[in-house]
Amino acid sequence: MKLFLMRHGEAEPYLKDDASRALTATGRASVASKQTLLPTIDLMVVSPYLRALQTADILVGEGLQVSYRTVDERVTPDCELDPIIDELINPTLKTQLIVAHNPLLSRLVRLLCGNQAQSINLHTADIACLEADDFQPGCAQLLWVR
């Protein structure tokens, strides 16, 4: 299975609350340019924060094919990793995409890929591609980050 982890595009500064921060024009453009890196996705899990929802919408608007999409509170910036590994990542699928935030996504890559990914820090609109038969700590291979 391939697991794609995408950090949302560049967002506006923190004003009233973190969850309602929208993408900037630069953020929208950088997300749109990444759509071609993704294959057809069996399951897309998206953070309920506005900038992640906008990122997912842009990907689909640019032509990303997604079989099923869901919004999940377990992929907000500082969530625990165990529920994601134990409950959200479905290794029976061919492809899955999680659109979320840092520090969550960088922590998840480092945990799943172990030593090969200890210096990984996803920037806005970055996508990490991981592969494994079973996504447990240290068992995934980091194929690329773009």
Image (cartoon, grey):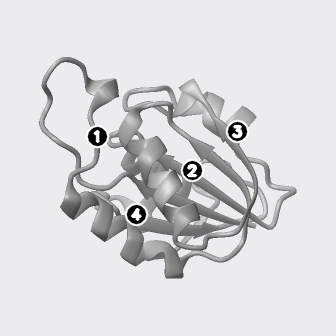
Task: Return the residue nearer the eye: 69 or 127.
Answer: 69
Which residue is at 34% across, 26% downward? Answer: 19
Neighbor class of circle 2 (other Cα within 10 Å; few <14, some 14-19, many 20+) is many
Quarter of the image for the C terminus: give it: bottom left
Q: What's the mark number on residue 55? A: none
Residue at mark 2: 98
* Residue 79 pos. (x, y %): 46, 26
Task: From this view, report whether residue 45 is shown above or below residue 37.
Answer: above
Disc 1 target residue: 22
SS type, badge 2: strand
Identity, as a three-letter code, of the amino acid under mark 1: Ala
Badge 4 amino acid? Ala
Using the rendered image of the protein, determine whether residue 134 is visible from the camera's viewpoint.
Answer: yes
Where does the N terminus fall, quadrant-wise?
bottom right
**Mark 3 neighbour class, 10 Å CA radius: few under 14, some 14 to 19, many 20 or more:** some
Q: Farthest top residue? A: 16
| Residue assigned mark 4 | 117
Q: Residue at x 28, y 61 (%)?
A: 119
Instruction: First in sequence, mark 4 or 1: give its number.
Output: 1
Please state which of residues 94 and 9 is positioned toward the viewer in this rendering. Answer: 9
Q: CA distance from mark 1 to mark 2?
A: 18 Å
Q: Quadrant of residue 14?
A: top left
The amino acid at mark 2 is Ile
